[in-house]
Image (cartoon, rainbow, N blue to C red):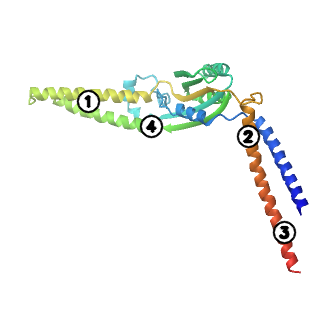
Amino acid sequence: MWRYIKKGAAVGFLAFMALWIVGLAREASVPYPLPTAWHLAVSDELSTPLSQNVFANNLKQIGLAQTPLLLVLDQPDVEKIQVEEKTAQLALGSDAFDDDEAAIRTALAAHHGIVFDEKHSGIAPVRRLLLEISVPTDEFDALLGKLQAIGQIQSISVQKRDRTSEFRRLDAQRQALKQYLASVLKLRGGKQVSIEDELKLEQKIQDVEKELRTLSLQMGDFLGKESRYHVSLVLTEYLPGSRFDRTYAVPQRVAHAFVWALGWWLALALVVAVLVGMCLSVWTLGRSTR
């Protein structure tokens, strides 16, 4: 019996070593995972509110692209205006920061991307670049494809939202204020209005006109003459784990391979134990019936 136990232990040990070797080969073929703190920092960067709204609209399709903004808002076709927002958040890791930054700017130039906000932080070898980019709607997908091929992509998300209801809500408020202003203007200069009431009416008119200007500016944010989408990009420099980095990468890779091999070994051991148990149970039951 003891002889079979020793053989079983030897087979189990050799199986574990084989799995560990496979794990080491697997670890050597994939990039070293970036630390969790890096992902959290990138997430914080990408969740920062945008410094500029970038929207797409259908002004060109309804023939209002060349009409001045204030006239657009008073056109009957204003109800046909549709507004949408499409954004992409892209995080890239790089061990060749300068080259990848140059590649990003080349891609932006090729696809007419405009950087409207830029932030640099850190020093080599842990630099970070944040770019807020607006890009024509028909160039969005092509630019995103080019950017994903630069460095090592760590995360990407694309969102598309219809903002037409918000635009129409602002337009309804503006129309209501215009009607209110017209009614107040009719009262100004009336024969039955005292000087005090006249001053109050004048103040009210100024307040309403100020609200109208504010609403017009808010609506104007939706109505850029060129429809564009938005890309938020973070490029982070890091020292990659490699087999040549013996002070950090190799021990970590060996440890990860050990954990991976142990998990699979335990799973296989459980399967073997269940099969052996089934065989022994069947054999025992077979003997007891004789």
Total count of labels: 4
Dots 2 and 4: beta carbons under 8 Å? no
Q: Residues within 10 Å of mark 4 (few under 14, many from 20)?
A: some
**Element carrying mark 2:** helix
Which residue has dot 1 on it?
208
Residue occupied by mark 3: 280
Residue 172 coordinates in the image, percent (x, y): 34, 37
Dot in front, 1 or 2: 2
Label 2 vs label 4, nearer the camera: 2
Q: Residue at x 18, y 30 (%)?
A: 186
Disc nearest the viewer among 3 and 4: 3
Residue 48 visible here: yes
- Residue occupied by mark 2: 255
Q: Evaluate whether residue 88 shows in this view.
A: no
Alpha carbon distance from label 2 to label 4: 53 Å
- Image quadrant in which the N terminus is located: bottom right
